[in-house]
Amino acid sequence: MEAQVPPELLSGRSRGAHVKALFESIAGHYDKVNDLMTAGQHRLWKRDLVRLLGIGPGDRCLDMCTGTGDLALLVKAAAGPSGTVVALDFSPEMLARARNRPGADAITWLEGDALELPFDAASFDHVSVGFGLRNVAAIEGALAEMWRVLRPGGTAASLDMAKPSLPVLKPLIRAYEFAIVPRLAQLVGAPGQPYRYLPSSNLAFPDRKGLERLFTQAGYVDVRAHEKAFGAVAIVTGTKPSEGPV
Ligand SMILES: C[S@@+](CC[C@H](N)C(=O)[O-])C[C@H]1O[C@@H](n2cnc3c(N)ncnc32)[C@H](O)[C@@H]1O
């Protein structure tokens, strides 16, 4: 039965199913709306994330919640021809868009759940996730899976919405997200309703400090948050220690 409560209030399987259905419904509009609502800035933030991961030629990389594949393609460019990039998402519609992009043949696209990654422990040198942790049903579970599949010494990074540190900006950004973004989405033909989920999912998402704490609790070291767009967006990075439990 269709859930009647906002997806951000759901947990576990029902939230996963709801979020999956939501991305299935907006896949064809996703890239256009992203460009519009961030004025193209998301492309620069994604480049920053890839740089912060410290990817080298030949590295093995996983991009989780890959969507239409922006990050996976940038990660592949950094890892070079000898690098391996696996990009995973649970939405077939989002993956279909990713698979059609120039350069997509060099990447392994996989339908799967970020909360149950189908990989052995220590399989990757780097794991990235762009605007994904906010959407998973259990952030701690996703961070634990990222940790498990990283090799010791490997790096992880999440790019996502955050809460601006300057109090004066908070109501402005909230108004932009709640009132303007759904209208921008409709302007390019996307359904407005899913874009009402975005700001509410952000309300339920930890702030920059909270996400740093979750990274640290998951076992990452050198955890840092890098603010973008006056703190409305943040990249959080961490390293799996070289010694200790795998
Ligand atoms: C906001 S989009 C981000 C897409 C892309 N990473 C980007 O930065 O543009 C979130 C993506 O996460 C995927 N997703 C959400 N929960 C997931 C899960 N548990 N497992 C796999 N993918 C998931 C959705 O299908 C969607 O494609």
Image: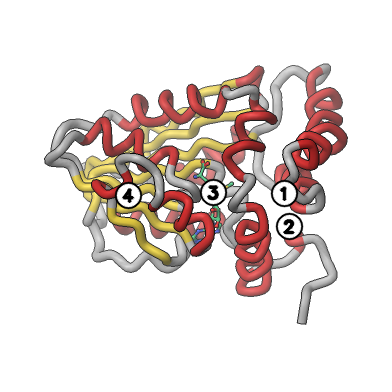
In the image, 164: left or right of 66?
Answer: right
Is 54 situated above or below 219? Answer: above
> Label 4: which residue?
62
Element marked by disc 4: strand
In the image, 65: left or right of 177?
Answer: left
Element marked by disc 2: helix
- Decide which of tag 2 and tag 1 comes sooner along the chain: 2
> Label 2: which residue?
8
Disc 4 CB within 8 Å of nearest ligand 1 atom:
no
Label 3: how many Cα within 10 Å (few below 14, some 14–19, many 20+): many
- Whole-number angstrom distance, CA of label 4 to CA of label 1: 24 Å
Q: Nearer the viewer, residue 235 or 46?
A: 46
Disc 1 CB within 8 Å of nearest ligand 1 atom:
no
- For marks 4 and 2, give the one nearer the viewer: 4
- Decide which of tag 3 and tag 1 comes sooner along the chain: 3
In the image, 202: left or right of 16?
Answer: right
Residue type at mark 4 is Leu
- Whole-number angstrom distance, CA of label 3 to CA of label 1: 11 Å
Residue at image coords 36%, 62%: 110
Q: Are marks 2 and 1 in contact (CB under 8 Å)?
A: yes
Residue type at mark 2 is Glu
> Can you tell which quarter of the image residue 230 is in?
top right
Residue type at mark 1 is Ser
- Decide which of tag 4 and tag 2 comes sooner along the chain: 2
* Residue 132 circle label: 3
* Residue 201 circle label: 1
Disc 3 CB within 8 Å of nearest ligand 1 atom:
yes
- Decide which of tag 3 and tag 4 comes sooner along the chain: 4
Is 210 situated above or below 21? Answer: above
